[in-house]
Image (cartoon, rainbow, N blue to C red):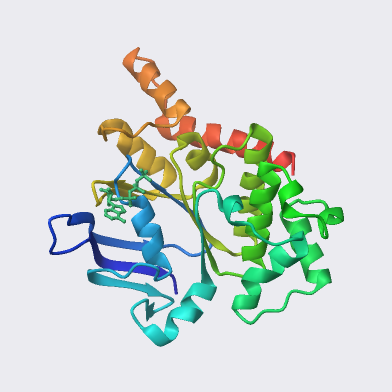
């Protein structure tokens, strides 16, 4: 069973002069085994939605269920948080341990999972970090390596759902590519991934499904190409489209007849082929 948002509304500071309707009657089922991208202009409710998925925030109205269990069931919250791991933006800023090994072991320990040295080495390998860094200080790693370390610690919990806010933000092209390959390989291992991103090319490359939010409402949700095509027809202020969608629009404006679906899908498949080919 997936994560279900059933008519979910979320209000910050309800009943006060500072009241903000962040999400308004959201109805979405996040499909298992896929990567879903949540996009939308700034302030559209993306981060709020992520925090509802693992019960960090509770809906004011409606219900979020994880595998059929409501996030409002207090006794189930720990089990839900184990299943649904949330990685905030720049997780590397939260590293604190003296060694990479301690850092990897810390998160899982909170869920009663002991990480052996062997398991830690496997996790390093999984995120593409050199096994030789196990007893180094996390603070000696590069920015991109620190981020992968933060992700390794979460993977030690073996989450069924991995939720990431801007997973590749501020990384150089190589660092971004490593994160993309990691997310695609997690998907291949059956992990359901949800990302928030402002980078539309990244969303086009990684995601199977796209959820578009605007001022707390769902503008579109569905298969990636269908959603991008629908966004070509309607203007959501503050939301860019991937470069190739814009190319397509220019072609259409110049009267060049192409099947938009083929252009979008071929381009994404080509980029994916290159990324996977390097794996
Ligand atoms: N802690 C808070 N208290 C009050 N209002 C908040 C709080 N956090 C967010 N909001 C408001 O809720 C709305 C949705 O915010 P949210 O951070 O979910 O949007 P977002 O789409 O993630 O934005 P961004 O792309 O800028 O990160 C915005 O109007 C925001 O100002």
239 to 217, vertically: above or below: above
Question: Where does the image place residue 139, in percent across and percent down from the top left?
Answer: 71, 50
Q: Say which of 107 and 203 sits in front.
A: 107
Occupied quadrant, residue 266 = top right
> In the picture provided, is 76 more to the left or to the right than 26?
right
Q: Residue furthest top?
A: 254
Q: Is residue 97 left or right of residue 77?
A: right
Residue at the far right: name it. 132
Q: Nearer the viewer, residue 192 or 104?
A: 104
| Left or right for 71, reference 158 | left
* Observer able to see residue 157: no
Residue 258 visible at all: yes
Across and down, in percent, residue 108 comes to 64, 73
Residue at point 35%, 58% (across, down)? 49
Q: Nearer the viewer, residue 177 or 259?
A: 177
User: Residue at left 79%, top 74%?
Assistant: 116
Q: x%, y% of residue 151?
A: 63, 57
Picture quarter with the C terminus: top right
254 and 105: which is toward the camera:
105
């Amino acid at each position: 069973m997936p994560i279900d948002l059933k008519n979910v509304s979320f209000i910050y500071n309800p009943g006060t002069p500072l009241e903000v309707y962040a999400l308004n009657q959201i109805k979405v089922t996040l499909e298992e085994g896929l990567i879903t991208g949540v996009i939308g202009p700034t302030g559209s409710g993306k981060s709020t939605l992520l925090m509802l998925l693992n019960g960090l925030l509770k809906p004011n109205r409606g219900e979020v269920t994880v595998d059929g269990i409501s996030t409002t069931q207090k006794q189930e919250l720990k089990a839900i948080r184990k299943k649904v791991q949330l990685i905030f933006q720049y997780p590397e800023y939260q590293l604190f341990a003296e060694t990479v090994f301690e850092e990897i072991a810390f998160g899982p320990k909170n869920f009663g999972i002991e990480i052996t040295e062997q398991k830690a080495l496997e996790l390093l390998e999984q995120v593409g970090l050199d096994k030789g860094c196990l007893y180094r200080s996390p603070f000696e790693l590069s920015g991109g390596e620190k981020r992968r370390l933060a992700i390794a610690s979460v993977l030690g919990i073996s989450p069924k759902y991995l939720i990431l806010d801007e997973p590749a933000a501020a990384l150089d092209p190589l660092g971004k590519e490593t994160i993309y390959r990691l997310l695609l390989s997690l998907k291949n291992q059956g992990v359901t991934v949800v990302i928030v991103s402002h980078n539309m090319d990244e969303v086009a490359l990684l995601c199977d499904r796209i959820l578009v939010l605007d001022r707390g409402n769902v503008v579109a949700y569905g298969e990636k190409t269908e959603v991008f095509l629908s966004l070509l027809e309607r203007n959501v202020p503050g939301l860019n489209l991937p470069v190739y969608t814009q190319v397509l629009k220019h072609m259409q404006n110049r009267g060049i007849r192409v099947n938009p679906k083929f252009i979008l899908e071929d381009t994404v498949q080509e980029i994916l082929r290159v990324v996977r080919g390097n794996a």
